[in-house]
Amino acid sequence: MYQFFYDLTGNVIISTIAVAVVPLVNILIVALIGVYLERKVSAWMQDRVGPNRTGPLGLFQTVADFVKMLQKEDATSTEIDRKLYNIAPVLVFAGTFASFAAIPFSKHLIGSEIEVGLFYILAVSSFVVAGILMAGWASNNKYSLLGSMRAAAQIISYEIPTAIVVLSMVMLTGTLSLTQISEIQTAHFWNWYIFGGPGLALSKFLLIPFMIVGFIIIFISTLAEVNRTPFDIPEAESELVAGYFTEYCGTKWAMFMLAEYGNMFAVSAIVSILFFGGYQSPFGYLGNTLGVSWLIPLEQVGWFIAKGWFFIFIQMWLRWTLPRLRVDQLMSLCWKYLIPYAIVNLVIIGIISLL
Amino acid sequence: MALKTETMVLNMGPQHPSTHGVLRLELEIEGEVIKKVTPHLGYLHRCFEKHAEAMQYNQVVPYTDRLDYLAAMGNNFGYVLATEKLLGIQVPERVEYIRVIMAELQRIASHMVAIGTNGVDIGAFTPFLYLFRDREYVLTIFEETCGARMLYNYMWIGGLSHDIHPDFVRKTKEFVKYFKNTIVEVDNLLSYNKIFIERTANVGVLPADTAINFGASGPVLRGSGVKFDLRRDDPYSIYDRFSFDIPVGLGLQGTVGDSWDRYYVRMREMEQSIRIIEQAIDQIPEGDVQSAIPKRIKPPKGTSYARVENPRGDLGFFIISDGNTNPFRVKVRAPSFVNLEVFGELCKGHLVADVIAILGSIDIVLGEVDR
């Protein structure tokens, strides 16, 4: 995308800023729609109406909320560690923001075509932990401290099964670039890795059950990494009030929320790239049939966003259905079940890929 | 070098999302493990007992509503029974039937809140709203009957404030029929949910003898496997005419007396309440609900004690009369207060998250704890 802007403007600074602004706007939109959708989805599930006053169908509810939050006084306790307290939300947001840089929305609509995109996203998303720990410590609040300790333990633990599943996918595809992984799964949905990947060899059919296991493992562990129910123990409302951001309000609180919804989209994107073809259409492109080449990127963006929101919807669905796990149960789920299964899965996929 | 460590004191409440009102818990924790729990009460103290001494007997009834505000009918019931005993009044059959139906509807409504909030504490928000949606049916029935949705002042000494609404029987039958589906739905969504069971089974185990020693009652006692229900063991009003079972904790998912058992007893009690309502609703005799209300309430010298099985347990009213129009002393045996005593025992060694699950399963109402 940088190249595109550079060709357009011929100016390094402008094109860099443009590349940086696109994901920012993207996260804002994701958060605005995400919060609205969360309210509506929960309302549908709970036999309620949901927001319906502000604008048509309550569409401007989150916009109004956002404006309200910007106007709020930044009320802080006097006993806080002010430096860390101020840096923490920025750091948490930066982790999310940075991971959007490497997510391919279409073959060309990508912030930066890094060869090691997958690795990069795993790396920058662990940035969030540092921010959360800072927030919990600097707030000088016991609920925040407990919440941040829980969050750190949880996010770090659940990165392991995520990484192992990612490793098995890297083994199959032979690349860390998200664009290339998406490109491999082109043409039709039976080329998606959830259906064993491209080709029609025997190994494809052998792979299918292990791909499904891999998908389930990575979906569960990314759910835990973004602190969604049933793994929302760091911000467990009924126990820790709001967890690590108890003491935050106004814009800083909004940054945590932006990061949360941004993360939801980011992990949905990774899951859909690894297993569901990323931006690839499941049935081939209308642009190819009609011979209109400029239609293809638009279709790709559309498919990618649709897949991302589909997984966000599943996350919301789970959130409003399931109760919350306890800290020790969460850890035992990770260490006793997910990690062993992920390792076994990795070995089997390795053997099959050698066939 | 030995590391200097110390326990952390976490103040939970009085403003906290899941202390069910204004309870303050002082948790002494090591990491997340509870070393000691000290409940601090009194944030909702309203001097009910002292206040009652300055009121005439009939004027106390509205104040009893505010004790266990989720089960106001039951509180009315206990107080009027105690006063009627003092006065020696026999209330008409119609009044007895309506009182029993109201008390059982109230039990269902109250258990719905208890189960729902227990679920919310553990993170399941949706069943809570389903239950609140259905609680509206009961509240609407109450509203049509006496004009209030929460604090009814419905049962008066010797009678009732209003006769039932013409639609009452039809609506109650409709509700009972409809509500059976909700019980199945909540069972599927929450009771047998794997995560819910993981969170509540074997958590906060209360052995039967400890429960008896602490004087626990209601679902907390029955959850420990003790088959004790005042409606059966010390029948008041006309409860001896109906057949119903007393559900007890069986330890189906863990140990007898764990949080899940207490929760489960409430689920099954709602079914039994439905049974009682179904038996009673067709038998309501004709009559006047206010004929037995005395013109002037001036009981003879003496004392009386009446207890009823409220949704939260054994609610007792002890009244001393000195022959005046005001009671000399009113003492309330509040089940929530007594059940809360067990709480500290249950929490030892558990995690912070369990405190919430256990508190939800004990189901206290602060209006009654503090009075």
Image (cartoon, coloured by chain):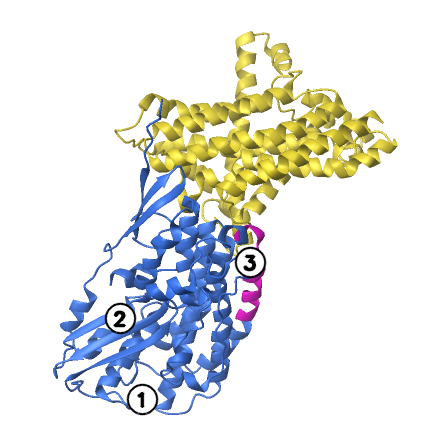
Chain colours: A yellow, B blue
Quadrant where the image shows the N terminus of chain A: top right
| Mark 1 vs mark 3: in front | 3
Residue at 43% in and 32% down: A149
Q: Residues within 10 Å of mark 2 (few under 14, many from 20)?
A: many
Give a yes or no on whether discs 1 and 2 share a subunit. yes
Of B71 and B220, nearer the camera is B220
Determine the chain carrying the residue at label 2.
B
Looking at the picture, which amino acid does disc 2 mark? Thr
Q: Does the magenta-highlighted stretch encompass residue B191?
A: yes
Residues drawn in magenta: B179-196
Q: CA distance from mark 2 to mark 3?
A: 37 Å
Per the image, the residue denoted by label 3 is B253
- Using residue B27 as the reference point, say whether residue B300 is left or right of it: left
Left or right of A45 on screen, residue B359: left
Q: Is residue A181 above or below residue B308?
A: above
Tally the marks.
3
